[in-house]
Image (spheres, grey):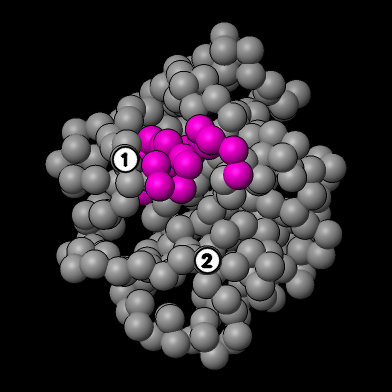
Amino acid sequence: MLRMRQICLVAQDLDHVEAHLRGVFGLEVCHRDPGLARFGLHNFLMPLGNGFLEVVSPFQPGTAGGRFIQRRGGDGGYMVIMQCDDIAERRAHVASLGIRLVLDSANEETDGIQLHPKDVPGAIAELRWNRDGDAPDGPWNPAGPREHALESRRAQFVSAMTAAELQGGDPAAMAARWSQVVQRPVSADADGHPTIDLDDAVLRFVEDSDGRGEGLGGLDVAVPDREHVITAARHHDLRVSEDESTVMLCGVRFRLV
């Protein structure tokens, strides 16, 4: 089992992005993690389908999130967090590839590793196991109590995250490295972009076309009511593509599918 359970973005103004996500996609906050204060960050998580969208923001200088904002010239995509069912095997496999870890943390409820972005380019990849997490909507420790997540989940205007789009100078090489890590083959989409299929979503690898360099540049979201989303995005003064297929929010291309 390997699911795209959580996507993390970084923002300079956390309240501003929260208001946009509420207003455009109808999302609600289910959890704020006080433990991130030790990293100089504050955050929120919002249920999106069976997954979670997290946004973090630095509140003091010298944080990794702050350096990310400076390096990429503003808000953007930060992490792809994948849920697995055998973290011990995943940890051993990553070690066999010589990949360094940014974080290795475990408790009785959850166990996960974050991979160094110098070794796995495009975004910080995280592999995480969660107790009783076999069901698609099962508990997910980083998002707080399961009942809060279920109470906060909305699907009227957006119902799932279906793809993460990683950009860089060599998409094929990036895809090959991620394929080694997740132990899934590389294929291609209709436009010829390298892709990797997870159980519930796709990782797509594209050229850097916005001049911001390597990073998590896009997120595909399933929207039952596209017209509402587009109207709300314009009301919030967000940039909408000419063909109304994409909304720019928090430095990320939200592709409406």
Badge 2 is on which residue? 102
**Where does residue 104 sit, x and y in percent of width and height?**
41, 70
Residue contact at pointers 2 and 1, CB within 8 angstroms:
no
Q: Quadrant of the C terminus?
A: top right
Question: In this rendering, is residue 184 above or below 38?
Answer: below
Question: Which residue shows up at 35% across the image and 77% down it?
Answer: 87
Question: Which residue shows up at 72% across the image and 40% down it?
Answer: 70
What is the number of the mark on residue 110?
A: none
Question: Which residue shows up at 19% across the image and 37% down it?
Answer: 148
Using the rendered image of the protein, determine whether residue 194 is visible from the camera's viewpoint: yes
Q: Is residue 38 magenta?
A: yes
Give the Cα separation between the discs numbered 2 and 1.
20 Å
Question: In this rendering, is residue 97 above or below 18?
Answer: below
Which of 201/96 is in front?
96
Q: Give the residue type at disc 2.
A: Val
Badge 1 is on which residue? 34
Q: Report the magenta residues as a range.
A: 37-62
